[in-house]
Image (cartoon, grey):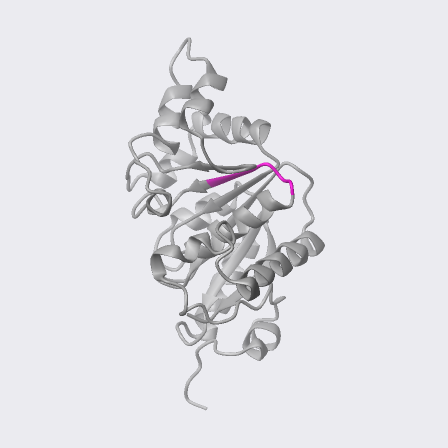
Amino acid sequence: FIDNRVKSPWDVEVFLGNDRIGGIPKISDVEERERPLIVGNDLDDGLTESFRSMYSRIQMNSQADYPKLILVTSAIPSEGKSLISANLAYSCANHGRKTILVDFDLRRPGLHKFCNLENSKGLLSLVNDVGQKGMELDKAVSDVLIEVHPNLFLLPSGGKTRAATEMLEHDDFAVVIELLKKNAEVIIIDSPPIGLFPDSLAIARKVDEVLFVTRYGKVSRKVVKSLIESIQETGANLLGVVPLSL
């Protein structure tokens, strides 16, 4: 009775009043470094099927046409946000959708690590490049997008910065978003935890849809509900909540 953390489907559907997007079974049997590759490497039939179901449910709840931007966020770190982002991106690619996975966690980037890639070029360098006169924009995009799977391209962060909110307001960032839309049907953006940094709420105003990830037994229901209400105030369509057991 005293424990008010999100810990069951009832908490998501009744207390939070949101759709539960998929039910991801416990993934502790999969090594931590391989969890973003569950779908890409088909590591577990049951888990892969869960992500297929998630993809289908998102299609049902989606209000946006292609190309579209989907933001994936959570309340605090270590809730499984990045592994959900990566596996959803693989699922979209496997369904024939050309997909770009963007690492927008510009304070603690990590998506490049699961593919054993460098992080010297990426989103930050691309934003800088489009602002230079005479730059061939299509070439600038192709130089930073890395194909990691059929139909799936990774856009690393290209470094770190604490000035993400300022960057979002620049015209050059808007140009980058339009370039990405020309190169893919689905752009999945992995962002910092919305409960700690303003970056996620700022970029939520720039995307079409948001997926909220929460780990069972980690965050209080009131905190999650408050953060979800903040997301809805941006005008983005909240696709639902993905509860995760680690």
Residue positioned 39% across, 33% down in the render: 123
Res 77 visible: no
Residue 211 in the image: above or below residue 152:
below
Q: Residue 150, position in %: x, y? A: 55, 37
Task: Name the image quarter holding the C terminus.
Answer: bottom left
160 in the magenta segment = no
Residue 2 in the image: above or below residue 97:
below
Relative side of 79 to 241, left or right: left
| Residue furthest out toward the bottom | 1
What span is in magenta? 96-101
Q: Residue 129, position in %: x, y? A: 38, 20
97 in the magenta segment = yes
Q: Residue 25, position in %: x, y? A: 51, 70
In the foreground, 50 or 128: 50
Residue positioned 69% across, 48% down in the render: 63
Residue positioned 52% across, 53% down in the render: 39
In the foreground, 195 or 139: 139
